[in-house]
Amino acid sequence: MKKEKVLCIYKPDLPASWRQETSIVPIDIDSFIRTCSKAGFRFMDRQQAENDISHKQIIPYIVIQTHDLEKTAIYNRKGSEKRLHDLWSVGIGGHINPCDLAGMNDSFQTVLMAGMQRELNEELELRPDNEASHFSGIISEDVTEVGKVHLGAVFRILTDSPEQFKPGSELFRFRWEQTKNLHRFNLELWSKLALKLISL
């Protein structure tokens, strides 16, 4: 695992509804930011954070669908997180790092949005620049080893131009799949939770 620092929140300071065995919480962006700001955040060494179940690493998790919701972008995991290999994912995203801070006094909102945009820029070589991401809520689970130490901030991009998305090397076997057929794939648990969240 490469040496990096990642944004974390002390788990007991998060609402109980976010700390269930599986949590699917539709919430508006202002409430999410207010709650996380009140809880406070810090950057921890990732190697430490991956083994510390008292903290949740905050992960922007972006789902891309066509406006009619008939198609969803999906890819096969083969990146640095070996515990997710061979699973399919509908979520693009990753850790928030100190590089996402413009200054030491940046707000949680500023670092969250900067981290999300950086992840999109890293994972997608090309994408339309006029399609905004919209916050849907949070997902969390304590079922898998990965889930125990992460919390997903779910965003969604709705597009009329799926052909304009060009994946980077991390998005292995990237494709557009009929949303109604996603249950046929061996999806990671977070993808299942995110799909439930955005359908609420």
Image (spheres, helix red, strand yellow):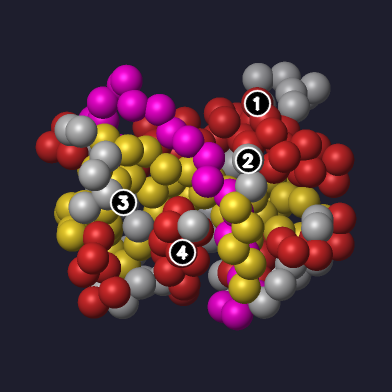
Q: Residue at x 31, y 67 (%)?
A: 88
Q: Which residue is mark 2?
A: 28
Going 74% across and 23% down the picture, which residue do you hit? Answer: 106
Q: Amino acid at mark 2?
A: Asp
Foreground: 11 or 101? 11
Q: Are marks 2 and 1 in contact (CB under 8 Å)?
A: no
Residue 4 in sight from this viewpoint: no
Q: Secondary structure at mark 4?
A: helix
How many residues crowd around disc 3 within 10 Å: few (fewer than 14), some, or many (20 or more)? some
Asked if the stretch drawn in magenta spans residue 126, the answer is: yes
* Residue 74 marker: none
Q: What is the span of residues highlighted in magenta in the rendered image?
A: 124-144
Disc number placed over residue 196 in the picture, else none: 4
Q: Is residue 194 above or below residue 103?
A: below
Compare marks 4 and 1 and give the one earlier in the sequence: 1
**Residue 58 percent across, percent down from the top left:** 64, 50
Residue linked to disc 3: 170
Judged left or right of residue 125, residue 15 is right
